[in-house]
Amino acid sequence: MPTAKELQAMKSKHNVLATFSYDKPKVDKGYANQTLYVNIESNEIKSKPVTQDMKDKFIGGRGFDLWLLWHAVNDDTRWDSPENEICIATGPIGGTTQYPGTGKSLVTTISPTTEQVIDSNVGGYFGPLLKFSGWDALEIQGKATEEIIIVIDGEESTVTIETAPEEPVDTHILSEILTDMYAEDEDDRRNVSVVSAGRGAEHALIGCLNFSLWDVRRGGIRVKQAGRGGIGSVFRNKKLKALVVRQPGVSGDSNNPADLNVIQKTGVKMHREICTEDHRQERMRTTGTPHLIEVMNAYDLLPVHNFQYGKHDDTPKITSDVWFKLFTQGIPDGCWYGCSMACAKTVENFELRTGPYKGEIVRVDGPEYETAAGVGSNCGIFDPAAILELNFYCDTYGVDTISWGTTVAFLMECYERGIINKEHTGGLELKFGNREASLELLHQVARGEGFGLIAGQGIRRIKKIFADKFGADINFLNDIGMENKGLEYSQYVSKESLAQQGGYALTNKGPQHDEAWLIFMDMVNNQIPTFEDKAEALHYFPLWRTWFGLNGLCKLPWNDVTPADNPETDEPNKVPEHVDNYVKLFNGVTGMNITREEIILQSKRVYDFQRVFNIRLGKGLRKFDAQPYRAAGPVTKEEYESRAERYDGQLKELVGFDPEGKSTEEKLAALRVYKEDQYEKLMDSVYKRRGWTENAVPKIETLKEIGIDYPEIVEVVKRHL
Amino acid sequence: MITVNGRNVDWESGLTVAGLIKKMNYIFPQIFVTINGDLIKKDDYDTTPVSDGDAVEIIHMIAGG
Amino acid sequence: MKYVKCHPDKCGYKLVCMATCAKKVQKSDDPALANIVITKKDDGTIDMNVCNQCGQCIDVCPTGALYRNKPGVVRINKDICVGCYTCVGFCPTGSMRTHESRTVPFKCISCGNCVKACPNKALAHEEGEFEPSYFEKGEPGEPGETFPKEYF
């Protein structure tokens, strides 16, 4: 860490390009009622009013982001076009301190890997502090010509664009430097949050953003990631080094809620529930999300060797008992105030063994389940130290751990199958389990050299390079490359759950489990056997979960802990008491009087709007919902034979094909015809339930029904009817 | 023969709810169990017998997320 | 460390302690703001609830607003507290208090005013000792304990 003098020297090199002073509004019932527009090309900074129609139709968070982005871009805007924006917003409930999981920021942009809208949900203090500084959302447009930062100081009521030529780019250093630089004193550091990427995001298209918080208890910086879809790459492409927000004085009524009492009561009830239930349910407070490693392994759902298999004999090396010992225990690990679920775990005093920071002792934020499974089991790396090292470097370089894990797993399979060799990889032996190779490849991404330049582009582009330049069979690559819409899959094996195949691929942004995770409900509980049942689940759950993103909420406190009497309720899978909590929170903050059903309507507007947005950008239709076959069934002989009994049984019982005496190839082919047909039928059912055409276009009557039949939206839809 | 979540599973004498959960390798902690529609309390898993022909539901309470 | 010890068998349910606490500590006439709560249960027995200064709340506070002062009493720094109420939900005795007129929780400061005011001697100011909480034992994450070598 630089000394105070060095910090001062660094800051003295800043050249303020624009300063904007504003009248800071008092947040009223969850809204600041204005958004901040910053153009880093023209250096224009201005305030835009939030209209009642915006609040009624788009609520906040992802809804506001998308509405602002929609008006900023044109039909041909690409990820690196100057008019593309990065939009960041929390929502009306965001910044509530009394209830767990209420400090999320939603980030959207046009993605470099999916070439359509991406949204990402992230912790850290930025979103709430942005709102309490007077801004419901921030949109950043244009491309700077030199390295810049944007500083929003809520206490001074100023926004500045400043050059920042000397600060290092990597997150773990930069976020600490800027926190120290813009905090008035040590105590003020908790009031500062920094958004940054890293060197990797400069050379890769799978870049992420890190949102910081000053951890009072650890006396250091923590970072949470807006990981999906390459937002960090857009950030660095704009020559943005960082965003800084400073806002002192967060309190229990910073949101100025309509009914503080109901929020306090609902919050206390939830804290009590977590206190009494978590330790006998998922143990989020002590092991965080990695408790899922052993669960997924037990149900054959943990991705192993590029999603070929669902379990592995070495899994016990990376299960939650291991992480329990490595995580610092007994610390309030929320990523915003009041999150008693406290799943944002860290490993302290980790000595790096590779790369530019070799030998340094660092704090690792994580791993989350997704990271441990992605850079770990999916790549055949069952080694906690390697997982932590990959986790740390992905974060500080600004590379998404999920995309990195899934991409490297794909590359390793290509290597093992001889599709690529050392000549292509520059000598890297990319075999499953080779932790050194994965780390070296990641360092190459950060340095912008060698095979790292290909690896960082994400699976969709890599497939094309391998086919065009290395003569690979594109059909096979399409079968095993785990991406849909250009986004790499997150870390669950969906082969045995048709509903989850839809949960992954019949999405707006691509295969991220945050729309719908239906594997237990479908595969294990057998609760949604028919196409209509699955379609209903793929209507309800994605909309329910969209709502978290409209309000600045985290999904985890909804169902990663449940009230003791939840099994006795009418719909345990929806956790009715928690749904009621959210209704109370929304009404308590905004003063409105919505019902459970209106939650779904609020989401439906934004969800369908996002679908239309994708259609406007030339995507969003049925063909873009196609999934790689590996998400549905066995691609290779080895995969089939690893579960021969199960697949033979399916052929007999479901397909009406007698496997007796047939070769594996014949059985593979018969099963594939069946599974692909099932998926097509699922698409038909889901689109119908969603009020869309067979081509996945929201019908005009649907848009009318939900009240977003704006002429500009209808006009896009009309082209496809 | 019994059914678990609507699918046939072999029955054996002396089977308890706890034994059945173990046999199915259902290690996820957030589950609840019904036998022929009746909810079984967690504390009673060890002592509650599963009889031949029972329709057992072992519902995992994570859905959509 | 001195804490307020309750003897419900001696309580006459006159609620003098609550009125005294509200007045002297919270400067209010509303007994709902008292740091001590006396309730009559359905079976007619008395429940007396007040903080025993165990300090477990110190560990769950994300801001460091909860601390033990020199005499050993657990106090809240209202300037730092953001009113998250985690301490309220996690208090093992349910003695961290809330009120709709406040944005931060409140609790017994072991001043002894209620003890002096109780006409029935149902309250006593006693010396007690508690296991130091996690944070009281020392800040975590400091150098000294390195990542275990067995994982390399």
Image: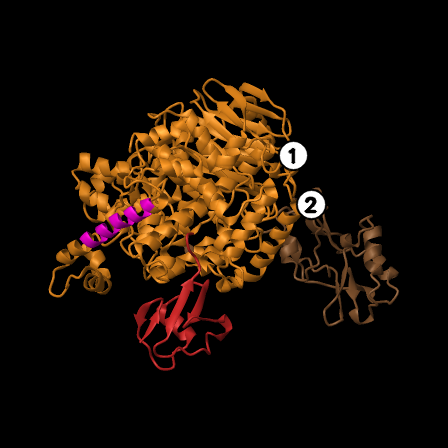
Chain colours: A orange, B red, C brown
Label 2 environment density (alpha carbons within 10 Å; few <14, some 14–19, many ≥20): many
Residue A491: mark in rendering: none
Q: According to the image, label 2 marks what residue?
A: C103
Residue C116 is situated, as x and y percent measured from the top left of the image, at 87, 60
Residue B1 is situated, as x and y percent measured from the top left of the image, at 31, 76
Mark 2 — on which chain does it sit?
A: C
- Whether the residues at callouts 2 and 1 have beta carbons within 8 Å, the answer is no
Left or right for A498, reference A166: left
**Residue A5 in sight:** yes
Q: Is residue A674 magenta?
A: yes
**Residue A489 in sight:** no
Q: Which residues are magenta?
A: A673-688
The residue at the point 35 percent across, 79 percent down is: B52
Q: Which of the 4 image quarters holds residue A245?
A: top right
Residue A315 is situated, as x and y percent measured from the top left of the image, at 36, 59
For residue A347, above or below residue A440: below
Q: Is residue A641 magenta?
A: no
Left or right for A397, reference A339: left
The residue at the point 44 percent across, 69 percent down is: B33
Helix, strand, or loop for circle 2?
A: loop
